Image: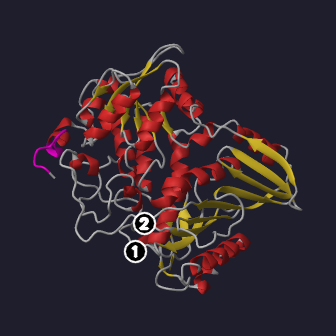
Amino acid sequence: MSSINRSISRRDFIHSGLAAGVWLGTASRQSFAASANDEVNVGFIGCGGRGGQLMRLFQKIDGVKIAAFYDPDPGRAAGAKKSSKTDAKIHTSLEGLLGDKGVDAVVIAACNHWHCLAAIWAMEAGKDVYVEKPLSHSQWEGQQTVAAARKYNRICQVGTQQRSDPMQAEIKKFLHEEQALGAIQSARVNRYGRRGSIGKRSTPLEIDPKMDYNMWLGPAQDEPLYRNSLHYDWHWDWNTGSGEMGNWGVHVLDDLRNNVFQDKVSLPKQIIGGGGRVAWNDAGDTPNVHFVYFDTGSIPVVIGLSNLEEKGSAKHPGPGSGYIAYCEGGRLEGQRGRAVAFDSEGKKIKSFKGTGGNVLHQQNFIDAVRSRDASTLNTDVQVGHDSTGWCNLANIAFRAGDTYSHAAAKEVSGGSGVWVSLLEETEKHLKTHNIEMESTQIKLSPMLTVDVEKEKFVGEHAEQANGFLKRQYRKGFEVPELV
């Protein structure tokens, strides 16, 4: 990294009060209060692919002005300004954007490891926040973000946009009010989406000297990178990403929490899971095959995930990215934008058509910014924290695991039908890549018990698992402890 810091030095960041968790300017007293017709000025933190998509969605909303951009990669900020066709200001520092009195709310589409810290700093600075999923990179920092929203009385929406799809209300009415399929007995969540290797270099990746790499890293550790690309592939590095579980798994698990549990289950009571990063021999360390069982105390849930290219096709029930509610009288298969209900004999009895939630979700955020009523949010920060929590725990189960064995996997008792099916499918799937399930390539955690209220593991094996609830922060970029 160049010795010339192109935005703000870590030392200056600390002295500014931001890194210490205190906003020393006057912005903390700022409070947006407007009528339904007043303009809301929005700033963007992170101007890559998802940032650009969100910018275009917010531009479709009446009364929203794209006011500012910040990205540690100046080329991305310049590209966002050009494509937005606005007079938005490009800030050369995050401090500059957060201190901009012309910005009412921020959209955070940075890497996962930045979501919570950027959101907390923004709320300290008096901004409302729309933060991309997953909310947190670790469970502890998600708790601090919820606390920040309450402490500073900010509107904070998490970007699980399908929450704003009107179809979801129709599904909940069908399953719960009408009980059209009878009681829900178990549930299955899927994320089967092909991805390729991210490569494995023999020498560290060279960082573009035009980038403010210190700010790109932020809370993450400064470690050499051996993948081929800096951008996007940070997803598959635990230092900056949350793997496919945090990338797509959070969407389908959020649908499950919303439609099957109606948000009555914040976190599972017990969890067992495993998987591996296999076949590619690349620089990633998050699993490309992942399988987890969640004991909720009521309806048992499993999730199966794979990114492997298939020799044939991955055999699994239901949609590749979606969920199945298995009921007394049939099943409902849901996914983004649509769902189908089948009776106990497999006959289709009802279809649901949705929008996917884009624009509606962003509109929901802007409406709450204007009304100052966080209770109207479809994914309030607490809801987003709970759904992200399932992903965080699933990732911990993998990271705390040891060599897989069928005997250990059979520790699951109640609701073991969906778990046994998932394991059998995963074993067949791995064999198409000449990988044995019972091998050192595949891990499995012990059964881990969760204290749902305290959001930590208890009992046997808790110490190792709890070590993953909070990360080590780089000096100057510590998430402040608010609870």
> Residue 68, image x and y in percent?
33, 27
Q: Residues within 10 Å of mark 1 (few under 14, many from 20)?
A: few
Residue furthest left as drawn:
3
- Horizontal side, residue 197 vs residue 188: left or right: left
Snapshot quadrant of residue 354: top right
Snapshot quadrant of residue 300: bottom right
Count the marks: 2
Q: Main secondary structure of the magenta part?
A: loop
The reply to whether residue 70 is visible in this rendering is: no
What's the residue at 57%, 78% (across, down)?
430
Q: Is residue 47 above or below residue 258?
A: above
Snapshot quadrant of residue 269: bottom right
| Camera-nearest residue between 207 and 238 | 207
Q: What element carries label 1?
A: loop
Disc ID at residue 388: none
What's the residue at 69%, 76% (across, down)?
420
- Horizontal side, residue 332 vs residue 157: left or right: right
Residue under pointer 1: 281
Magenta segment boundaries in residue numbering:
2-11
The reply to whether residue 363 is visible in this rendering is: yes
- Horizontal side, residue 220 vs residue 310: left or right: left
Decide: marks 2, 1 in contact (CB < 8 A)? yes
What's the residue at 66%, 74% (across, down)?
425
Residue under pointer 2: 197
Identity, as a three-letter code, of the amino acid under mark 2: Ser
Tell me which numbered mark, 2 or 1, is placed earlier along the sequence. Answer: 2
Indicate yes or no whether the magenta region holds residue 5.
yes
> Residue 422, image x and y in percent?
66, 72
Q: What element carries label 2?
A: loop
Indicate yes or no whether the magenta region holds residue 228.
no
What's the residue at 33%, 57% (across, down)?
229
CA–CA distance in space, label 2 to label 1: 8 Å
